[in-house]
Image (cartoon, grey):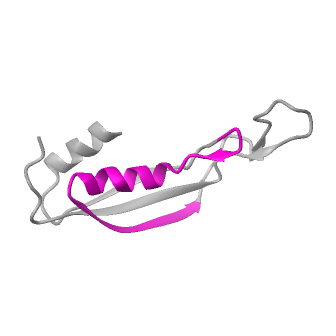
Amino acid sequence: MQMSIKYVGKILKNNGYAFHVVANRIVNTVILPTSYAIKDIFEYYGFEYIKTYIRDIPNKRMPPMNSPTNVAGETSKTMLKEHIVAMKKSDNIINID
């Protein structure tokens, strides 16, 4: 992810916008906040955070619930929402190498 964001920083014009769509994955009932990691990596490369839009995942093919512990009757939600992280490339960004 970091390398792709770095590449976006190299090719995007100053004051341009980047939108990254991710889902915060749930592993064994623990939410992995991928959207926050994406925001942090973009900021590391000089981008300004605009907003994160959250919406239902359209045409979801995974079941809404699963059993991450493999214990009968214990279920947990799967990824139900996608996070669209909006960032803006600063006009005073230092060269990204």
Q: Residue furthest top?
A: 70
Image: 32 above or below 70: below
What residue do we see at 36% from left, 63% from top? 86
Displayed quadrant of residue 69: top right
Q: Residue at x 12, y 59 (%)?
A: 93
Q: Quadrant of residue 4?
A: top left
Residue 19: give x, y in percent of width and height. Answer: 35, 57
**Is residue 91 toward the left or the right of residue 79 in the image?**
left
Q: Where in the figure is residue 17, as x and y percent of width and height?
A: 25, 62
Residue appearing at x 29%, y 53% in the figure: 42
Query: Residue at the spot x=11%, y=66% of the render?
Result: 91
Find residue 13 and report its horizontal and vertical position in percent. 13, 58
- The N terminus - image quarter: top left
**Residue 49 is inside the magenta segment:** yes
Q: How many marks on residues? A: 0
Report the side of 57 relative to 64 (left or right).
left
Which residue is outermost to the bottom?
50
Span highlighted in magenta in the image:
27-55
Decide whether residue 3 is among the magenta residues.
no
Query: Which quadrant does the C terminus fall into?
Result: top left
